[in-house]
Amino acid sequence: MLGIPPASFGLQPFRARTPQEIDSIVGHVWSLMPQARYIEARTAIEGLLKDIRICKADSELLRALTRAHHIAGHVIATNTRTSEISLVIQHFQEMEEMARSINDQTLLNIALTYHGDMLRRKGDVYKAMQYLEGTRDNTPEADLASRGNNAQLLSRVYLIGKDLKGFDREIKISEELAHQVQGGTTGGSYSLGTVYEEYGKSYSRLGDMNLGLKYLDLANEALPKTKRWEIVLKASRSEALIRGGELKEGLKLAKEATLLAHAHGHLRLLERIQGVKQYLNEQAGKYIKATSELGEALDGPIEY
């Protein structure tokens, strides 16, 4: 209003980006994900969204911005601790609002599904289940990839809630849809390989190490040979082995996964490995208690 250039205050002016410019940057950020270049990806997408101004909110521009918030939420979720998950949810809320305004059920499904998954990550399993079930039931026109992704993440919530029938139903739906999907709108975050990895994690947590490892082998065959999936599969295999009592090999892989996660800024995976450490602490406590009880039985009552 005063005619003073923003640079005079040390500020960079906002730019009116075209949908094509936004899509180009979004595509670049997605291309960083297979290489596990999460810090670089976050810097790029946050820079885009901070540097943007909507001059004319046409549907093409809103669609491009919706896709930008999708990758922003995805990469920041990877690079953010659970204590700061509200930063991620904001992007999925922005994505939801824009998807509704352009009446795009596929993008709406993705926004609500990931919002629900972030609630699950916070520990609000009931609310996460409501989000994911509502998304499933109210976006029937979403594409196969987003619906399959929803089913996979819903199966995860059912498992945490100990609804094994629900888990089995949704993971099978997810697997069935994955056989029909080539590409899709999830940026490689949902495929037959990710479903197999979900099976592997789930069965190992249910106490069936052999079945868990079988599915992780299938996941390894189905997923692209990238740094992104190398780190994830290493962590999942280590968890399966540790929970199955194969501590030597499991700990070796867990240490390797931890170093890789630190190097690439994969904070979400570090929290998963922290969960494995907590599991070991719980098991150690059980063994100490059992040892004490058995010792009392063997030694008999103390006489004075």
Image: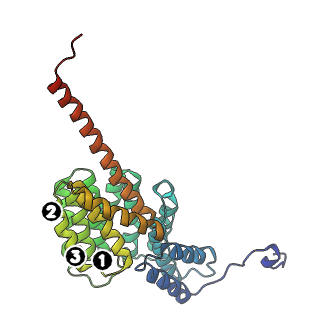
Q: Nearer the viewer, mark 2 or mark 1?
A: 2
The quarter of the picture where the N terminus appears is bottom right
Query: What is the three-letter code of the residue carrying label 1?
Result: Ala
Q: Can you see residue 115?
A: no
Number of residues whose C-alpha sits closer than 10 Å to that of mark 1, classed few (under 14), some (14–19) or many (20 or more): many
Q: Nearer the viewer, residue 84 or 290?
A: 290
Q: Position of residue 175 (x, y in %)?
A: 20, 72
Q: Position of residue 271 (x, y in %)?
A: 41, 57
The quarter of the picture where the C terminus appears is top left
Q: Which mark is residue 177?
A: 3
Q: Which residue is mark 2?
A: 210
Q: Nearer the viewer, residue 254 or 111?
A: 254
- Label 3 vs 1, first from the N-terminus: 1
Q: Which residue is mark 1?
A: 145
Secondary structure state at the residue bearing disc 1: helix
Mark pair 2, 1: CA separation: 29 Å
Q: Can you see residue 18?
A: yes
Q: Position of residue 250 (x, y in %)?
A: 27, 60
